[in-house]
Image: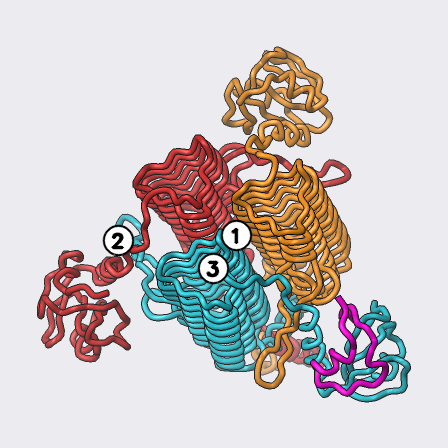
Chain colours: A cyan, B red, C orange
Amino acid sequence: MSITIEKIASHLNAKLIGDPKLSIESISSVENATKQQLVFIEAKDIQSKVDKTTAGAVICQQEVKTSKTLLIVKNPRIAFAKALELFDRPKDIKQGIDEKAWVEKGAEVDPSATVYPFVTLRSGAKIGKNVILYPGVYVGQNVKIQDDAILFPNVTVFKNTHIGKRVLIHAGARIGDDGFGYVWNGSQHYKIPQVGNVVIEDDVEIGANAAVDRATTGTTKVGQGTKIDNLVQIGHNDQIGKHCIICGQVGLAGSVNIGDGAMLGGQAGVADHVNIAPGARVGAQSGIIQDIKTQKPLFGTPATEASNFFKSHLIISKKLPEMRKELLRLRKEVEELKKNK
Amino acid sequence: MSITIEKIASHLNAKLIGDPKLSIESISSVENATKQQLVFIEAKDIQSKVDKTTAGAVICQQEVKTSKTLLIVKNPRIAFAKALELFDRPKDIKQGIDEKAWVEKGAEVDPSATVYPFVTLRSGAKIGKNVILYPGVYVGQNVKIQDDAILFPNVTVFKNTHIGKRVLIHAGARIGDDGFGYVWNGSQHYKIPQVGNVVIEDDVEIGANAAVDRATTGTTKVGQGTKIDNLVQIGHNDQIGKHCIICGQVGLAGSVNIGDGAMLGGQAGVADHVNIAPGARVGAQSGIIQDIKTQKPLFGTPATEASNFFKSHLIISKKLPEMRKELLRLRKEVEELKKNK
Amino acid sequence: MSITIEKIASHLNAKLIGDPKLSIESISSVENATKQQLVFIEAKDIQSKVDKTTAGAVICQQEVKTSKTLLIVKNPRIAFAKALELFDRPKDIKQGIDEKAWVEKGAEVDPSATVYPFVTLRSGAKIGKNVILYPGVYVGQNVKIQDDAILFPNVTVFKNTHIGKRVLIHAGARIGDDGFGYVWNGSQHYKIPQVGNVVIEDDVEIGANAAVDRATTGTTKVGQGTKIDNLVQIGHNDQIGKHCIICGQVGLAGSVNIGDGAMLGGQAGVADHVNIAPGARVGAQSGIIQDIKTQKPLFGTPATEASNFFKSHLIISKKLPEMRKELLRLRKEVEELKKNK
């Protein structure tokens, strides 16, 4: 597959300097590019970076002297993302319902949607425009999936879940499974039935093999534009704000509230009923067991301000053994002083 | 769907005070209830909580003055769980074997069981009464699944596994995959074939996308009534007792023993061959690398008693920098004293 | 199933002492063996261990006096692994493409391969000799799977992935999903399309429900002979060397480099763009945020040498409260000395 630089420039709304017919085969990083590849360069030293790269074409912020073809844009990183889109168009779409799918009576599917083989659609499910359901997807009763959402292979969505527009759910993610709730009845853990649902707002992305539990009663919510990475666990009744970033293997217990724009690093954990402020920044592997009101970076378990954490960590690993020795020395000297008094 | 309060009272074996024909549409929390919803109230201040709630009906322990309908029971939380059950009855059951399933010769299925499309049943598999196998489930050779068990979509169960009565296995859980065992043969990691199996006893629940590996030789066992949350890893040859609680993303290495009633918090990890006492309580994100004999709460990596852990943590984050300053001050003063001696 | 000890001896290239017709039903551990079972004994005290075991046959390094049947080999542990293989031969193979599979036009399948029901093969996929694709496997466009690889149920492999010879991918693993990359465009996280691929070299094993993301541009690579356990997250553009061991629930961010033969303990995490030396040893639950150049065992978050970590940990949990008291005592004594000066 190749695309003319002219066509890319038009997609990016970029100023084109150089040969408009240059044929681009793919996007690359500055280091290993070929003449048929396009790269992007940010910020300073643009001239020297353009000189150095072996790419045939460069996205950058300002014009420099070069024989290479340039695409001038305001934000090269965003332009790079948009250029990649041109090379990522799904070419495998097959509109309509495959005869190897199982569509229960009472499910509604827009004719522009794609339902691949081995997909299950239960009664009451409503599938919007241009939705793509890859093989092995399970859609439960009364699930609503809005326009342009894509569910990759083997995703399961349980009854009464709502999925917004342009949502992407990656392979094997589980939306709306039972929350983890029991009450000890004297002889066993008695299951608390989980009768709530899950709402995933527009533009959310959920990673491979992640799990979003449905609410005990009420709704587990993932807010608009929030991005969730692979193998993340979202507990029952969690309320996640808009435009959050939740990295791989993060685990949230039940009834957690996360404010808009918060970021949680990989493998971080949050205890049940904890509230996290909008814009909070939780470091990787950190453990949050109390409400967070700051936007300063946090680290450790239990988490403290990252600056303190790293100061303490330095003292522990370097200074603590030395402090012990110093204490013993002082002890001796004080004894000596007391004797000689 | 709505149910009369009379019918709910009878299901809970509760004393009904008020209008027996009141129609309940769902269960809710005290804060946001409507007149057609039922809530539960525990412990003290029952009168004021009943006064405050906007619910039409309340489960509680004793009679109070109110125009609302009351259900009087001994344990409101258990009654709440039982009431939820009425609203959680699967209404999607379709007994028998769907023609889109693949049932190998030699598999036996009770006529009361439900085998949905895209289910695989290998030869020698035995499926008990009222078992439900959702779409995409894979059941290997000689797997036994006992009465009333439910396997949600895309669960895989490998050969020779035994699954007890009323077991629930949530979407995408993997039961009986190979344990992680190799021996270095001088040039590569040589795979140790895993020829054991897995036994899941009655009333166990296993979360979405969890993995329970089969034993190298012998059996990996999960004891009766134990509840395992999403994305948990159970290693080969682990022996898990009865009525344990294992929270989300916990990881157990191989040959771990966990006593009855132990609780492991989210993201905790246990090293191989470690023994954990019955009733042990392991905090979230903790790492267990030695045998645990206490029932006192544990925390940290390596885990120590939680009370000590939090004391030390406080000293580290607050007192350690101050201790360093104090040491330097003392050092100066002692020098001064020595000079003036 | 039972196999004569004679046949096992020949498979192991072992010296057989005893009854060649002894019938072995399975392999066991030394403690619980029956007369129809084979066990292995390593290193010292061979005579007493052989005397004690109730097994009918023993793999060991040298001849001892016994009525039991012996298999003498150089490396008993490797011989044990090889003996297990005899009992682990898949007996469920059904060569050819099942009519319940969905094979798109343009996919090529070697006639010796097995394609089970509910498998999806997209156009351009090439499936080598003796490959087994279990039910529910999804193979994307232009995926190449080389000879003798096995993909267990519900594995998904996205477009352009290459999978080497003898690779094993366990149930529910996701190969080639989108990497986690966005750029903030002032109002939302704008997705950076992920147009690279994944290369899995020969003899790699990937655990159940693990996820290996495809590269943003270029290739995410897992080197020859590397073994990856369940629920592991491999980020976009990671380069993993040969013969590494990556234990359960490890998480690697993007663009991580891991040298040949490195070992990462369970639940360890590695930050993006970090380089880890060949042969590095990272302890369980450790967090790596800087390049690692040593082969000494590491532990903690951020990780330090394990010996230091455990020394500091001991001081913290035992010595730190005592140090505080000692400081206060010294402070008083110095005050006293100053007064009396």
Question: Residue at (63%, 27%) from the top-left corner?
Answer: C83
Q: Secondary structure at mark 2?
A: loop
Q: Which residue is mark 2?
A: A185
Which of marks 3 and 2 precedes in the sequence? 3
- Percent position (x, y) of residue C108? 68, 46
Location of residue B2 (image quadrant): bottom left
Question: Residue at (17%, 59%) from the top-left corner?
Answer: B74
Q: Chain of mark 3?
A: A
Three-letter residue code for mark 1: Gly
Left or right: where B300 falls relative to B86: right
Q: Which residue is mark 3?
A: A174
Q: Secondary structure at mark 1?
A: strand
Q: Chain of mark 2?
A: A
Q: Is residue A217 visible?
A: yes
Q: Which residue is mark 1?
A: B251
Question: Residue at (28%, 71%) from the top-left corner?
Answer: B29
